[in-house]
Amino acid sequence: MEKTLEELGWDPFFEKQLKNTKFLPARIIRKHNSGYDLTCLEGTYYARIRGKLRKDLLKEEWPAVGDWVLCSLEKEYAMIEEMLKRKSKLSRKVSGKTSQEQIIAANADTIFLVVSLFEDFNPRKIERYLALIAESGARAVIILNKVDLIAEAAPFLEEANKLVVDTPIIVTNALKPETLKELESYTEKGQTSVFVGSSGAGKSTIVNVLLGEQKQVVKDIGKHKKGQHTTTSRDMIFLSNGGILIDNPGIRELRVWIDGDDALNETFSDIDDLAQNCKFRNCNHEQEPDCKVLEAIENGSIDQERVDNWRKLREESTELLMKRQEHGRPVDQRHKSILAGWTKQARANYNRRGGLR
């Protein structure tokens, strides 16, 4: 039985973009090395990008899992003719010296950050993920998983609560389905959820519980109770209640893809609030006089490591903007204003700390 557009995640945001067209709306459900699988009202098809569209887009702008496209149907496959504007986009920078973007998933409503309490709880890494999720436009939910492998969850939950303001935090044991009941409110009919996190955090186990079957291959944990990498591709999975899931391979290297300060201001709202009262508007909170952030570090109301991580992510994102501009990639007027504020001293400090590698 084929799904309706609404069951595939179609909503008024995409409906407004659909003008008079002879092409069919379809959603990308899987990406291959040679093409895509997409689903439309006519069924599921292997698809390729029309040559003209391929030429008009940078490679990193090509469709990703979760994207809505307009397609035509050939004899045995579909042809992607146009892409619809995304309502959210989770991206990271491709590894290496390139300034290229890698889209992890598109058009998600909720992004679940799965963290293993046993082996993967790192506040600085969580902040990095949260910054990327804030940039995406989707809502974040933190899942602190594998509570069964630790003695006490309270210290971890307390530490996690220091990192967020309004972001829900759910403590789970994926081997006990009742601990995942709270996720159901985020996986309702037509809602798209994405699972991200390090390899072995338990993403695929959680997906299997929500799905009610062993669709995602899960390896037994090793003798040291360390999770093992299982998911190797991005796939869209449909739940019996109408929810839509995208499972992802574990991310080993998480390079930021952030346009400006908005996502960082949201992720580090405590630092941003303090910075409003600093003496200097472009205060970097290192050694400037009358810095409210430095005062907060001194009186213990904010951690030095959190401020250091904020600074590092801010410098990485600005350096990335600069590299994109140097390589002729899209940088709009707002980005140019950000770059204009990238002072020689800030650049020198960043290079001194090792720069973007």
Image (cartoon, rainbow, N blue to C red):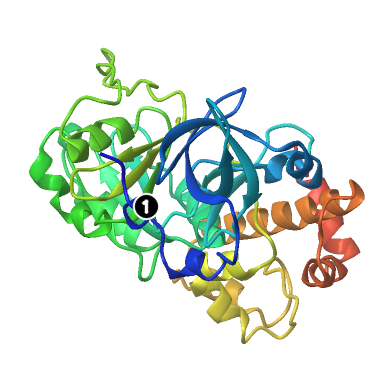
Residue 248 visible in the shown view: no
Q: Residue 58: percent from the left, percent from the top?
A: 77, 43
Give me the residue at 84% from left, 68% from top: 336
Q: Is residue 93 left or right of residue 350?
A: left
Q: As rendered, which of 72 and 68 lies closer to the eye?
A: 72
Residue 10 visible in the shown view: yes
In the image, what residue type sits under mark 1?
Answer: Thr
Q: Is residue 279 left or right of residue 186?
A: right
Q: Which residue is mark 1?
A: 192
Quarter the N terminus occupies: top left
Q: As rendered, which of 212 and 25 lies closer to the eye?
A: 25
Q: Residue 113: percent from the left, percent from the top?
A: 38, 47
Q: Is residue 310 above or below residue 355?
A: below
Which quadrant of the view contains residue 95?
top right
Q: As rendered, which of 240 and 71 lies closer to the eye?
A: 71
Q: Give the number of marks.
A: 1
Q: Is residue 218 above or below residue 351?
A: above
Q: Is residue 49 above or below residue 153?
A: above
Q: Is residue 316 above or below residue 294?
A: above
Residues packed near mark 1 inside 10 Å, few (<14), some (14 to 19) or many (20 plus): many
Give me the residue at 17% from left, 29% from top: 213
Q: Residue 51: percent from the left, percent from the top?
A: 76, 36
Give me the residue at 31% from left, 41% from top: 2
Report helix, strand or loop for mark 1: strand
Q: Is residue 85 left or right of residue 229?
A: right
Q: Is residue 147 left or right of residue 12?
A: left
Quarter the C terminus occupies: top right
Q: Residue 132: percent from the left, percent from the top?
A: 55, 54
